[in-house]
Image (cartoon, rainbow, N blue to C red):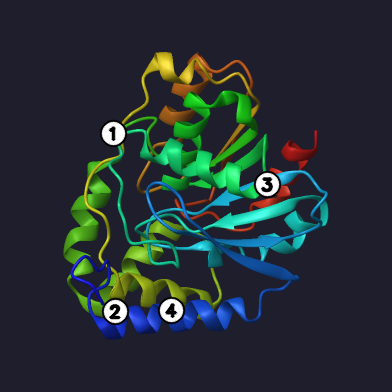
Amino acid sequence: MSAQSIYKSPGGEKTIMGLYDSTLAHWPVPYETLNIPTRPGKTFVITSGNKSAPPLILIHGAGSNSLIWAEDVIEYSRDYRVFAVDLLGEPGKSAPNRPAWDSLAYVEWLEDLYSALKINKAALIGVSQGGWTALKFAVHKPEHVEKIVLVSPGGIVPDKVTFVLKAIPLSMMGRWGIHHINRILLAGQTIANEVEEALTLMMANYKPRIGRLPIFTDTELQHLKMPILLLMGAQDALRDAEKISARLNKQLAHLLTIIIPNGGHALLNTTRHILPFLKE
């Protein structure tokens, strides 16, 4: 384990990688994995679906990895060539590098992935920080983006300070505190015990990135002419769904907004909302 490790200990890294490998071994559809060199760092990609189908790129959020798509990929891979991408610097199999958010590094990152995967234009689904990443790319390379799905995205309005004030002390209280952070993020939603255990293992063994995602300017958002779906939970403890929806509605010509009444920041069972949008 190098000095720049994003994990709390060598054992913690081993635990997370073991979880990754065991889950990937039971990936519910046929798949291949790729390790793609990019300017900001090596990137791990799980590919599924018919190679001749339209491309769909999935980008998870902070503190997680592509395993979050393990159920959704069943439906997505029926109609799309799916590329589940591990973000850099998060607890997945991509490089631990954490490029500056206020640079073009994430644009270059996706540009290199497109080139290696021989993609000209694709639909993007981004969760939280993954949503910010998809938007960053679309602002600078709109010609390469067919549609965007933003799930609880960052970078539209400032995050709620109240969540940070709750999460910091809870993160110091071991597994009990991590369990309560998960409950705050999930709001009224329920998840299987094994899924919550996986979330707890990752949060307990990984060092989250500290800082705030840059807020997109009005001018940047106005560059986005492609159809965009905003999917949020009304009970999101980290981001204000109504404020995000209001701001995007002012700047975007082709925005569809779905706010789930009992949904939190970590939304579950989203394919029923997303697939109709992608296919229309």
Distance from Cα at disc 1 to Cα at disc 4: 29 Å
Around disc 4, counting alpha carbons within 10 Å, would you say few (fewer than 14), some (14 to 19), or many (20 or more)? some
Residue at the location (48% across, 41% down)?
131
Badge number at residue 17: 4
Amino acid carrying label 2: it is Arg
Amino acid carrying label 3: it is Leu
Q: Dot 1: what SS?
A: loop
Q: Earlier in the sequence, mark 1 or mark 3?
A: 3
* Quadrant in which the C terminus appears: top right
**Is the residue under label 3 in contact with that under label 2 (CB below 8 Å)?**
no
Q: Which residue is mark 3?
A: 56
Distance from Cα at disc 2 to Cα at disc 3: 35 Å
Q: Nearer the viewer, residue 39 or 22?
A: 39
Q: Is residue 8 left or right of residue 279?
A: left
Q: Is residue 151 visible?
A: no
Q: Earlier in the sequence, mark 1 or mark 4?
A: 4
Badge number at residue 175: 2
Q: Earlier in the sequence, mark 4 or mark 2?
A: 4
Q: Dot 3: what SS?
A: strand
- Of circles 2 and 3, the one toward us is 3
**Is the residue under label 4 in contact with that under label 1 (CB below 8 Å)?**
no
